[in-house]
Image (cartoon, grey):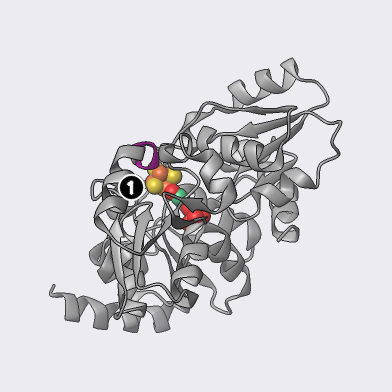
Amino acid sequence: MQIKDLNRSIERLKKERDAVILAHNYQIPEVQDVADIIGDSLNLSRQAAKVPQKVIIFCGVHFMAETAAIISPDKRVLIPDTQAGCSLSDSITVQELREWKKDHPGAVAVGYVNTTAAIKSELDYCCTSSNAINVVNSIPADREILFLPDMFLGSYVSKTTGRKNMFVWAGECHVHAGISASDVNEKIRTLEDAEFIIHPECSCTTPILYDMSTGTYQNKAVSVLSTEGMMNHVNNSGSKNFVVATETGVLYRMRKQNPQKRFVAASEKAECQYMKMITLQKIHDSLLHDRYHVTVKKDIAKKARLAIDRMLAIG
Ligand code: 13P
Ligand code: SF4
């Protein structure tokens, strides 16, 4: 089917099924264009709970669809491709987390939203890149913290909060770990007057941690933000040029909403193959065949929900 026929058919099926399409900022342009709501992982989970439709077509990766299913147990969450995983959420197993907790009795376990439902069920707090600092600051200073799974986000939070009794798991996202300081430096050198916006999962955060905490890097304004934080920032900033250090999918929405501004990827190679697995055809087939249903076992969902609710409560 041609794109326009697929779009027409998707619109018709959405009405028939009482469905809504949620898409992450890294989705391919055609998917973003057909989505009812686009956002970061936190925002999409919140929206999943609010939308009136019974069926949610979740265009993102599996842990995000699981989070939506936990928050909205009365809705039917479908993911168009079950292979859409996440290297970061795969970087810690439940067994490894349990052993880590055993080595630090009494520690508070704080996990990034990029984790499976089973890992979330073992956490005290869940957090996102936008509220990780607030979550850590809300924990009494004398309690040890186990922060997982992203080491770059963990180092950034530990540096920013000055927390000494915080242990960070050595996990990473292969896409963001691949954005190096030299990629960033090269782009910054070639773009006069550019602002630099960076996702905290990037490995390039490590050598410039000190600069980031002061808000400038090589005389350029620097902001560390989640993908939705990036969108709000570029929409409201008076700057004309931006170097963007994250998965390149977000540039489509930035350019669409700000045609008069220039956005350059810190690394053009930063593509998440899992995010790109979702296509218009798969969305269409998901609606047509009512597949693939994302479910979380009741006992896991109940425990994970506590950590997620704490994340949602701390802005
Ligand atoms: P955001 O929550 O900032 O959208 O990030 C999700 C993600 O997978 C980053 O790689
Ligand atoms: Fe996971 Fe990285 Fe892809 Fe985000 S970009 S979904 S963290 S693999």
Q: Is residue 223 left or right of residue 128?
A: left
| Residue 9 versus residue 122 in the image, above or below | below
| Quarter location, residue 109 | top right
Q: Residue at x 27, y 48 (%)?
A: 267
Q: Residue at x 47, y 79 (%)?
A: 18
The response on whether ligand 2 sits within 8 Å of label 1 is: yes
Q: Which residues are magenta?
A: 174-178
As helix, strand or loop, the secondary structure at mark 1 comes to: loop
The image shows residue 288 at horizontal and vertical percentages of 32, 69
Q: Is residue 175 magenta?
A: yes
The image shows residue 131 at horizontal and vertical percentages of 65, 54
Q: Residue at x 63, y 37 (%)?
A: 159
Q: Is residue 108 left or right of residue 68?
A: right
The image shows residue 255 at horizontal and vertical percentages of 30, 73
Q: Nearer the viewer, residue 260 or 165?
A: 260
In the picture of the structure, the residue carrying the numbered disc 1 is 274
Predominant SS along the magenta part: helix
Q: Residues within 10 Å of mark 1 (few under 14, many from 20)?
A: some
**Ligand 2 lies in which image quarter?**
top left
Q: Nearer the viewer, residue 308 or 217?
A: 217
Quick check: can you spot residue 305?
Answer: no
Amino acid on which disc 1 is placed: Tyr
| Quarter location, residue 73 | bottom right
